[in-house]
Image: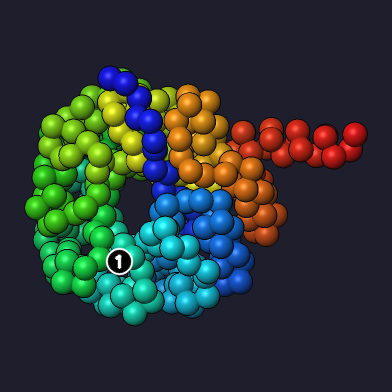
Amino acid sequence: MKFPEHVKVVEVGPRDGLQNEKDWVPTVTKVELIDRLTAAGFANIEAASFVSPKWVPQMADGSEVMARIKRGPNTIYSALTPNLRGFEAAVAAGVDEVVIFAAASEAFSQRNINCGIAESIARFEPVAQAAKQHGLRLRGSVSCALGCPYQGEVPVSSVVDVIERLAALGCDEIDIADTIGVGTAALTREVMAAAVRTFPRERLSGHFHDTYGQALANIYASLEEGIAIFHASLAGLGGCPYAKGATGNVATEDVLYLLHGLGIRTGIDLAQVVAAGDFISTAIGKSNASRAGKALLAKQRAAAEV
């Protein structure tokens, strides 16, 4: 299949990338990060998570962050809303899209939220109905779609089952997420090929973690299946809680370098993303995990010294 001419990159750094940071990231830093990403041209930014501060203290300032950002007219600002209480807070904060999630692994679902896959999705029915009543976009995410830390291999049929259930809730977009980053290009193509037979290709997205260094290969394999939406986190923000010390989200800079190198349009200014990645890495005192980002920064600094 011919590669898509345009790809939407969903920036998840402000939410998925920062949520597990132990040291508090100041609200002003989160706001500046999102503003930089808006200016860089992202059409979709995952900006907050409306969950209990007891479970995710880093996201406790979601409402304040949403109130202070400079919204772009063409940017969708998304937030994770696991229940009606979170949904109501998200609506009050003015989010454009709410995100719900379910695991393709029965073992993962039981270990993490003490219920099976079917029950976990049933819990989201009120949120899905409320999203439709409010005219908000609804996105569903299928976690552990390419492997599980507890049961190992996840049958493709299980992934398809969850996609069908999320589609029945009215999801506008569905993410296929390699939560622990164990997927390979061959498995990715198999899963995506099954997914596009179940849900419209143009509304499917890939969310790949880079634990085993396979994320870019998996994105390439997805492109071969016609997938045109991918999630990424600038500077590779976010770790993998199921593989201690391992890289989590694929770096946005690396994804953009790949896509632009293939002649695929994204509408995103890579130079601005590189600068934003440098900004947030410095602000939180972490090493920049983007290879392309570090290389381009080194090139800029070398040029400035000449």
Please name the residue that numbered disc 1 is placed on: 81
Direction from residue 115 to residue 111 in the image, left or right:
right
Instruction: Answer above or below: position of 113 versus 91.
Output: above
Instruction: Answer above or below: position of 160 versus 16.
Output: above
Give the image location of residue 55, x and y in percent: 39, 68
Direction from residue 163 to residue 219 in the image, left or right:
right
Q: Residue at x 51, y 31 (%)?
A: 260
Direction from residue 177 to residue 235 in the image, left or right:
right
Q: Residue furthest right?
A: 306
Neighbours of disc 1 within 10 Å: few (<14), some (14-19), many (20+): many
Direction from residue 149 to residue 305 in the image, left or right:
right
Give the image location of residue 204, x and y in percent: 26, 41
Q: Nearer the viewer, residue 235 or 179?
A: 235
Give the image location of residue 74, x and y in percent: 42, 58
Q: Residue furthest front?
A: 73
Q: Residue at x 15, y 40 (%)?
A: 199
- The image's colour scheme reads rainbow
Residue 150's image quarter? top left
Q: Residue at x 33, y 36 (%)?
A: 228
Q: Nearer the viewer, residue 88 or 187?
A: 88
Q: Amino acid at mark 1?
A: Thr
Q: Nearer the viewer, residue 221 or 214?
A: 221
SS at badge 1: loop
Q: How many marks?
A: 1
Q: Residue at x 25, y 49 (%)?
A: 173
Is residue 213 among what the camera can see? Answer: no
